[in-house]
Image (cartoon, coloured by chain):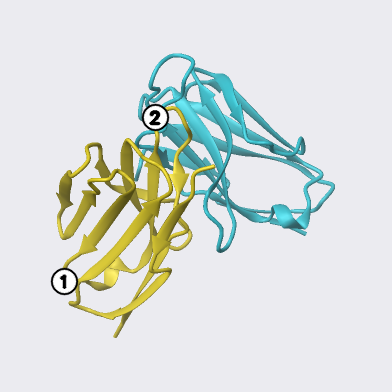
Chain colours: A cyan, B yellow
């Protein structure tokens, strides 16, 4: 148990569906991250939030829409996805280095959501 | 951008053997992190290193921050079945995002 939870753990959706992934951290962190993990590829950073503000969007297609209502919760809204978007989506959190600059030290990961797009 | 070369990509060992893996970078890092990922789970932080030359242990695991700040090593002594999984290194250069290696898949042969 790392203190970061993700729901659902598994999701199968069609290309026309709209779904959301949820992440919650109980570590008192103020920085949260979304990563995509595909087979045989390094972890790909998607989004970074620091004190609820998005500080990084790593050229992610607009069919992925993040939302961070508070420092403990992070969502990833999905719509009109493609089969190549099938992957493990990981949420992580960390202490911020400084306000306005998210720390990239010691990130703690959730268990991930295994997404399959049909 | 920064790249992390992690080797070996996979290892097949017998229970009780020692394991060594490493990561090398094309640029300097301020922090090295080592994670382990079990099937169907997220990466779990094993060891964090903050200073060049630092040697840190966590049970049977020992990791070192290379003197050049461009590499790091992870050793596992007397491997046991629960050591099976994928091990990732990650480097942090200060202002940049964490850069992850491609992982070392450890398999223990019965």
Chain-order first, disc 1 or disc 2: 1
> Could you tell me how far apart the alpha carbons at marks 1 and 2 are, in whole angstroms?
35 Å
Name the residue at 40% across, 35% down. B93
Furthest-top residue in this view: A99
- Which chain does the residue under circle 2 lie in? B
Quarter where residue B104 is shown: bottom left
Along the line of sight, the residue nearer the viewer: B24 or B104: B24
Task: Give SS at disc 1.
Answer: loop
Q: Nearer the viewer, mark 1 or mark 2?
A: 2
Q: Position of residue A6 (x, y in %)?
A: 51, 42
Left-right relation of A110 to A68: left
Name the residue at 17% across, 51% down. B58
Q: Kindly identify which numbered label has been placed on residue A49.
A: none
Furthest-bottom residue in this view: B110
Q: Position of residue A15 (x, y in %)?
A: 82, 51
Residue B17, relative to residue B86: is it above or below? below
Mark 2, residue position: B94
Residue A68, relative to residue A84: is it above or below? above
Left-right relation of A83 to A51: right
Task: Give SS at disc 2.
Answer: loop
Mark 1, residue position: B78
Q: Position of residue A30 (x, y in %)?
A: 43, 22
Along the line of sight, the residue nearer the viewer: B98 or A109: B98
Left-right relation of B88 to A54: left
Along the line of sight, the residue nearer the viewer: B52 or A22: B52
* Label 1: few (<14), some (14–19) or many (≥20) C-alpha neighbours in 10 Å: some
């Amino acid at each position: 148990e790392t203190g970061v939870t993700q729901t659902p753990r598994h999701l199968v959706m069609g290309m026309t569906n709209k779904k959301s992934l949820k992440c919650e951290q109980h570590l008192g962190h103020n920085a949260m991250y979304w990563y995509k993990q595909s087979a045989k590829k390094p972890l790909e950073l998607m989004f970074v939030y620091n004190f609820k503000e998005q500080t990084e969007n790593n050229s992610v297609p607009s069919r992925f829409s993040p939302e961070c209502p508070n420092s403990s919760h992070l969502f990833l809204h999905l719509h009109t996805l493609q089969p190549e978007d099938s992957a493990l989506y990981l949420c992580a959190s960390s202490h911020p280095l400084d306000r306005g600059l998210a720390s990239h030290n010691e990130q703690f990961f959730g268990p991930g959501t295994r997404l399959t797009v049909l | 951008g920064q790249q992390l070369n992690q080797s070996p990509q996979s290892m097949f060992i017998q229970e009780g053997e020692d394991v060594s893996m490493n990561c090398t970078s094309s640029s300097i890092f301020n922090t090295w992190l080592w994670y382990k990922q079990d099937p169907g789970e997220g990466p779990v932080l094993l060891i964090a290193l903050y200073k060049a030359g630092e040697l840190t242990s966590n049970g049977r695991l020992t990791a070192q921050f290379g003197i050049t700040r461009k590499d790091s090593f992870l050793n596992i002594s007397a491997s046991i079945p629960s050591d099976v999984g994928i091990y990732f290194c990650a480097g942090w250069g200060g202002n940049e995002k964490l850069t992850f290696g491609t992982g070392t898949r450890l398999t223990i042969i019965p």
